[in-house]
């Protein structure tokens, strides 16, 4: 009772790899075929790259950074727990504000990005005092998670249904490149700090 290859759904793409590639590139080209869609795609790619660079890059190195500023309570895993736990308020606030008619997705994302940048600058340039450093890192985590929530909503709503999965895959790849780049940059910065 197995269906024959000619009646099996998707068999055309399984037997002909070039059709799959052509379909993929055609779908990808839809993201850059007109000025409006291209502008949205590039802006969102930059946002995904930068947010991944900052948030994932910092979260991997957070135990070592906390240790360097003198925070040695319990264990370095406790610092990672504190940093990750500080995302909870950011998620709760963003869930409330994202549908607010006064704030909305764009303002939430912009405000979160600016606030996360300020917290990151305080974290980066405040060389002494573990309390301020840990507090700034926790604020960065909360704001960047709030920004991620708004960015996810904006990203999915920015593209038509026919190209949405391709767009999200492209944006996710841009974010992964940001995460990878962050590991090289922050490793060098950690050695010099």
Image (tube, grey):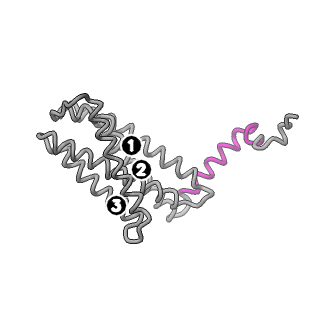
Kindly give the residue lying farthest to the left in the view shown.
128
Q: Nearer the viewer, residue 37 or 118?
A: 118
Q: Does the magenta stretch include residue 30?
A: yes
Front-most of residues 115 and 89: 89
- Residue nearest the viewer, comparing 183 with 149: 149
Tell me the crowding category of disc 3: few under 14, some 14 to 19, or many 20 or more residues within 10 angstroms, Cα based. some
- How far across and down, in percent of the image, does residue 116 sit? 28, 52
> How many circles with numbers are drawn on the protein?
3
Distance from Cα at disc 2 to Cα at disc 3: 13 Å
Residue 85: in magenta span: no
> Which residue is pictured at 41% across the width and 50% down the height?
48
The answer to whether the residue labelled 3 contacts the one labelled 1, judged by CB atoms less than 8 Å apart, is no
At horizontal 51% and vertical 48% (from top left) the residue drawn is: 170
Q: Do the residues labelled 1 and 2 touch (CB within 8 Å)?
A: yes
Q: In which quarter of the image is the C terminus?
A: top left
x and y, in percent, of residue 36 in the image = 50, 65
Q: Position of residue 39 (x, y in %)?
A: 46, 61
Name the element at disc 1.
helix
Give whichever of discs 2 and 3 has the lower sequence position: 2
Task: Determine the residue located farthest toward the front in the rendered image.
Answer: 74
Which label's residue is closer to the chain start, 3 or 1?
3
The range drawn in magenta is 12-31
Q: Disc 1 designates what residue? A: 178
Residue linked to disc 3? 110
**Considering the numbered disc 2 on the image, is that residue within a helix, a strand or a loop?**
helix
Reading the image, the residue beneath label 2 is: 48
Give the distance between the C-alpha atoms of the residues marked 3 and 1, in whole angstroms. Answer: 19 Å
Q: Furthest-right residue in view? A: 1
* Image point (38%, 57%), residue name: 94
Q: In which quarter of the image is residue 124?
A: top left
């Amino acid at each position: 009772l197995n269906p024959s290859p000619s009646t099996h759904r998707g068999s055309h793409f399984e037997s002909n790899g070039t059709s799959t590639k052509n379909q993929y590139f055609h779908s990808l080209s839809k993201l850059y075929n007109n000025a409006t869609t291209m502008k949205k795609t590039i802006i969102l790619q930059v946002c995904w790259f930068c947010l991944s660079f900052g948030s994932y890059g910092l979260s991997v190195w957070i135990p070592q950074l906390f240790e360097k500023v003198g925070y040695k309570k319990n264990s370095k895993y406790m610092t990672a727990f504190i940093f990750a736990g500080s995302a909870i308020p950011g998620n709760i606030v963003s869930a409330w504000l994202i549908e607010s008619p006064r704030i909305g997705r764009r303002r939430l994302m912009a405000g979160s990005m600016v606030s996360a940048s300020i917290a990151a600058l305080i974290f980066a340039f405040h060389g002494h005092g573990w309390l301020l450093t840990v507090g700034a890192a926790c604020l960065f985590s909360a704001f960047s998670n709030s920004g991620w929530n708004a960015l996810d909503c904006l990203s999915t709503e920015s593209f038509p249904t026919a190209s949405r999965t391709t767009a999200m895959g492209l944006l996710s790849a841009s974010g992964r490149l940001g995460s990878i780049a962050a590991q090289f940059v922050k490793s060098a910065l950690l050695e010099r700090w």
